Image: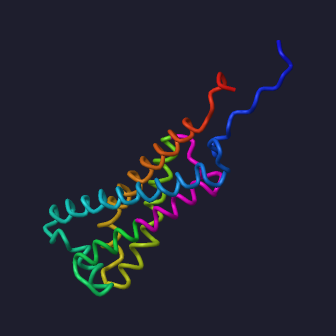
Amino acid sequence: MSTERRPRALSSRQGKGQGPETATGSRAIKFGLIGSLAGTMAMDLVMVAESLIIGEPVDGFVALIGSVVGGGVLVGVVAHLLMGSLLGLLFGTAIYKVRFLNIESMRKGVWLGVLAGLVTIPLGCVPVAIVTGVPIIEMVSFSFVPHLVWGAVLGVVAGYAMHSGLRSAEVPASHC
């Protein structure tokens, strides 16, 4: 048995030739953005389905948002995607910078995503309801499921990216 010390495997946050701030941090932010964009698109599809079920125009929500920011449906779609992108960047930064939010498994990624979706309801829907004059209960009831879908998609993408990223950043013991 050798008393020689083996070189330590790279940490889960550090790739070869990379400092701890670049390896997983940029990955978390990038996949937070990608997951949020995918989640926003999935959310919009759920809102279209909800609108069809209740007999409302399918572009009602984005038209409402567009009218608030001074445009039509297209402006509403772009504003919604931009807001989703911003939230994805915040999510990606949080899962990297806040230690207890670090994603070690797909399950934790999904739970954190769904939690983020729940947080966006009072932070996003309530102010939009107030600005547009839509009753808060109506806005929240319409957007509850879509925000959970947004969060679930965000969490799946971030969870996959971070979980597979942790595995690929580690050096197997046999290579040490």
Which residue reaches farthest bottom? 70
Q: Answer with the quarter of the image where residue 80 lies.
A: bottom left
Which is nearer the eye, 14 or 87? Answer: 14
Residue 122 locus on image (x, y percent): 45, 71
Which residue reaches farthest right? 3
Residue drawn at (15%, 71%) of the image = 57
Q: Answer with the quarter of the image where residue 81 lies.
A: bottom left
Magenta residues span 85-105
Q: Is residue 98 magenta?
A: yes
Residue 38 locus on image (x, y percent): 35, 56
In the picture, measured across the screen, residue 62 lies left or right of residue 148, that is: left
Q: How is the image coloured?
A: rainbow
In the picture, measured across the screen, residue 12 lies left or right of residue 150, that is: right
Number of marks in picture = 0
| On-image quarter of the C terminus | top right
Q: Is residue 17 magenta?
A: no
Which residue reaches farthest top? 1
Residue drawn at (42%, 54%) of the image = 154
Which is nearer the eye, 120 or 3? Answer: 3
Residue drawn at (46%, 61%) of the image = 88
Taking 103 as reference, is 176 above or below it? above
